[in-house]
Every structure is written in structure tokens, then in C-alpha cells.
Image: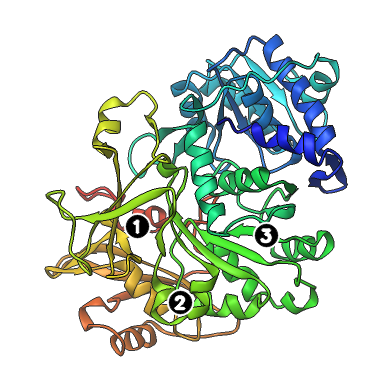
Amino acid sequence: MYVTQALHRALRQTPDLLATIDGDRIRTHRDVGARVARLAGALRDLGVSEGDRVAIAALNSDRYHEYLLATWWRGAVVNPINTRWTPDEIGYALRDSRTAVLLVDDAFAAQLPALRAAAPTVTTVIHCGDGPAPGETLSYEELVAAAPPVPDLRRGGDALAGVFYTGGTTGHPKGVMLSHTNLITSALGTLAMGALARPGGRFLHVAPLFHLAGLASWTAQSMVGGTHIMVPTFDPVRILATVQEHRVTATFLAPAMIQLLADHPRLRDYDLSSLSAITYGAAPISAALLTRAMKAFPEAGFTQAYGMTELAPVATLLTAREHLAGGGLLRSAGRAAPHCEVRVVTPDGQPAPAGTVGEVTVRGANVMLGYWGRPDESAAAVREGWMHTGDGGYLDEDGYLYIVDRIKDMIITGGENVYSSEVEAVIAQHPAVASCAVIGVPDARWGERVHAVIVLRPGATATAEDIRTHVKSRVAGYKAPRSCEFLDALPVSGAGKILKRELRKPYWVGTDRSVG
């Protein structure tokens, strides 16, 4: 199996179907196939050989689509860079992976001097934006126009397909190595459950393609054929307008994105009836928000995907039909996808009884090859084929997985264990709350105390005592936040995941514990 199979299939079966829509720029599969073969030729002429890493620091675009395919067409390895990182963080990933060729768009052109200083391994920079190519860079379009097409090397199977750097909570990020088999296995298992993409459909890429949620969506839609619609960043009005204009059939959204769309005052101004599938994940979602979202998008079937970069990325799915059952099932992350096994283990590595919280582990052909250049950490993470996720959760009698927290995020207050996701779910039920995050902060008496960071809905008011009273009416008193703060917005990653480490950081400065 190799990821470019999808393009070969499209070229044979639907060459004149639209492959990409990026603003006013529209290309068919025939167009894309020709451009990919020539871009791969340009990479060859630049000295890129099989297995070499080719990085990109860019927003979602049709050229990002071509970069992925052309890199694999040449037999090389993709290295998509987190667009929210600083030049120093990007430089580390480029140096660590020994990447020599880097693509940047207009959003990153101004950072080139800093990137070159931080990553002396990079010898060639290709400008893939719409503006003029900065000095000492090569023009993407000129390369595509001038290079001869080359044949697809069809490098696949267990060969390395990509190095995906995860945002480390401490120290440097780790490069997750995924093979072609990893990526395709996860996509096929997800598609088998009727999730993520529709054959011949139109997928709106809102999640950034550097993130595995975005890339998994791209892989799935490519495999079943259809059109990729690109937007560079998340903007609620632009998303709603794009769904209406291009009759989008499916998309992937992080919970923070769902909240901003479902609560948007202009939601009803747009015809969203074409949107039949919304997959969400990358962060926990409250039942209250999910219920609002399902009402906001009544034509769409909602699917939750749980996983992580190391799993390429899907482990479990809660299907659209299971969402309609409602009730307590909405708190679940679903059951194991067809391509893998999921179990919960105790600290000594034994399977935990149903209903008992332990560490979630996953085994299957989607499990990563390992961490780039970190054999010891790879061995610690993957043991006897099982990926140890670091997530705390439990399985019920029917095999549904319930995630309670990152193990490191569990708050121990006065000797009691508090799982932040449980408290967040209760706070989210308060009618004044738009979104929230619960963290542990230092406390002289309790060791840690439960602290809530809250964004209120427009025009709503609530006090810390209101929140505390609300929580205590639904769960044990020790789980209620002892302190609250109210912000206009929560810090989020490029994939829309709430950055709890940023919320914790001010409280743990000067302590002997990592903020995680």
C-alpha cells in the first residue's frame, strides 16, 4: 500500500472531477496528476532521494495537497510543521529530522531569516505562496512549470511516510514516525464505519493539514475519491459561507471550532443542508456542547474519533447512529475501530476490569514505527505491540471507551483524585458557559486545588460562586472548583486543542513540578 494509490485511481476513473478548490483556483485530478509528477521531478533535480525528509511550513492550500503527493511520488518523507510554533521550535524539528528542503508560503516568508538561522540543515527553500518569491528562495510555480515529470516510485508499505512532530509538554517535541501502512490502515478502518468522508464527496479542510486529524481527513477523502476544499485558517463566517457556496458534504472540526460555529449569531443565514458528516476529535467535548451542535447542524451525522498522532491517528469511533441514541453514550469515545484493538490496563500492565480507570492502550497496524531518533522512548511507549497512550479511561461492559483525563492531568486534591474532564462536563452545562478548562494549581492546604478557566457566552454573566454551586449540585463537593477565572478566549493549538499547559504555567512558575 502506498498513499499515492489514491491519485492513480482518480486519474483512471475520474480524471476530470474537481480535485481541489482553493479560493478561485480550481483544479481537476488530471491537472493535479500532471503537476505532482513535475513537482516530484523538481524535487529529484534538487537532490531529494528516497527516504529524504521534505518539510512544509504553510497554511492549508491546494499546493499543500500537491506537496504531500509529490513528496511521496518521489519516494521521500513528508515533515509537516506546526504553523503555531516559533522559529526556534520549527528549527529544532528541521535540525532533528535532518531536513534539507523546506516549503514555505506567504504566512511564513517573513520568518525565513530566523528559520535559516535556527535550521542550518536546510539548504533549499521553496516558496509556495501566491506573492513574489522572497530572495534566496525558489518559486514553486516556476519549478512545476520547468521540471520534467517523473514516474511514481510507489514507495509504500512499512516504509517511512512522514515524521510528525508532536507538541511536547516538556522539553523538545518528538518526531512520530508513521508508515504508509499506518496512514492507510487508519483511513480504511475509519471509512469502514461510514465515518469521515463520502465517496465522491466534497471535504472542507478546516483542521490544519500538519495535524494528523487534518491529514487523516485528507487521506480518507483521497481514498474514496472526491474534492478537497481548502481554507487557510478557521474563520466561522468563512466556513459557513464555504459550506453553502461549494456544497460541502463533510468536514472535521475540533470542539472549540464546533462551539464557535454552533453559537454563531449568523448560523441561520446560510444553507448548510449539504453537510452530511461532521467528524470531531483532538480534544474532549462536553455533552452540553454536543447537544447544541447536533441541533445547530440537523442534517449532519456526527462521529467522534479518538486517537493520537502515534496511532495515525484513529483508535475508537462513536458513530453517527450511536450519537442519535443520546444519553450517557454521548460521553463515550466509542468502540475500537475495525483496524485495531483497545484495552485499558492497570499500573502493573494487567487488563483492568470493566468500569475501572486505567491507561488506554492500543494495538494494530496503525501503531507508529516509533519516535525519530529516540529508541528508548519508542520502546517505552510501544510494548509488545501495544501503544501506551498516557490517557486515563475505562471500558464498559459493551466495549465503549470513556476517557477521563490525561494521566498526567489528573488533579490530586486533599488525597482525592479528580478528573478534569468530568468537572468540565458539568461546568459546560451551566447556561452561561461557552467553553471551559479545568486544571490543577498549587494549594498550600490541599496540595493542589481544582481551578476552572471559563469563557462565558455573549451577554451572559456568572460568578465563581455560581459555578461552584452549580458543580456541587451535580458531583461530589471536593470536585467543585475552589477558584475560577474568566477569560475572553482559551488558548488553543493549531488543531483547536485547548493548551492547558499555557493555563497552568503562571501558577507553577517557581515550583518543583512541571506544568505539563
Q: Dot 3 corresponds to which residue?
A: 250
Disc 3 residue type? Ala
Q: Which mark, residue 245? A: none
Q: Residue at x 57, y 61 (%)?
A: 279
Q: Position of residue 437 (x, y in %)?
A: 40, 67
Q: Dot 1 corresponds to which residue?
A: 504
Residue 19 placement, left or right of 311: right
SS class, disc 3: strand
Closer to the chain start, of discs 3 and 2, is 3
Disc 2 residue type? Ala
Q: Is residue 458 above or below residue 50?
A: below
Q: Position of residue 185 (x, y in %)?
A: 49, 42
Q: Position of residue 212 (x, y in %)?
A: 52, 44
Q: Is residue 90 above or below residue 326?
A: above
Dot 3 crowding, Cα within 10 Å, few <14, some 14–19, many 20+: many
Disc 1 residue type? Arg
Q: Residue at x 62, y 26 (%)?
A: 72
Q: Residue at x 70, y 78 (%)?
A: 265
Of tags 3 and 2, the one toward the viewer is 3
Of tags 1 and 3, the one toward the viewer is 3
Q: Dot 2 corresponds to which residue?
A: 287
- The CA distance from mark 1 to mark 3 is 35 Å
Residue 342 placement, left or right of 193: left
Is label 3 in contact with label 2 (beta carbons under 8 Å)? no
Quadrant housing residue 71: top right
- The CA distance from mark 3 to mark 2 is 21 Å
Is label 1 in contact with label 3 (beta carbons under 8 Å)? no
Q: Residue at x 55, y 85 (%)?
A: 460
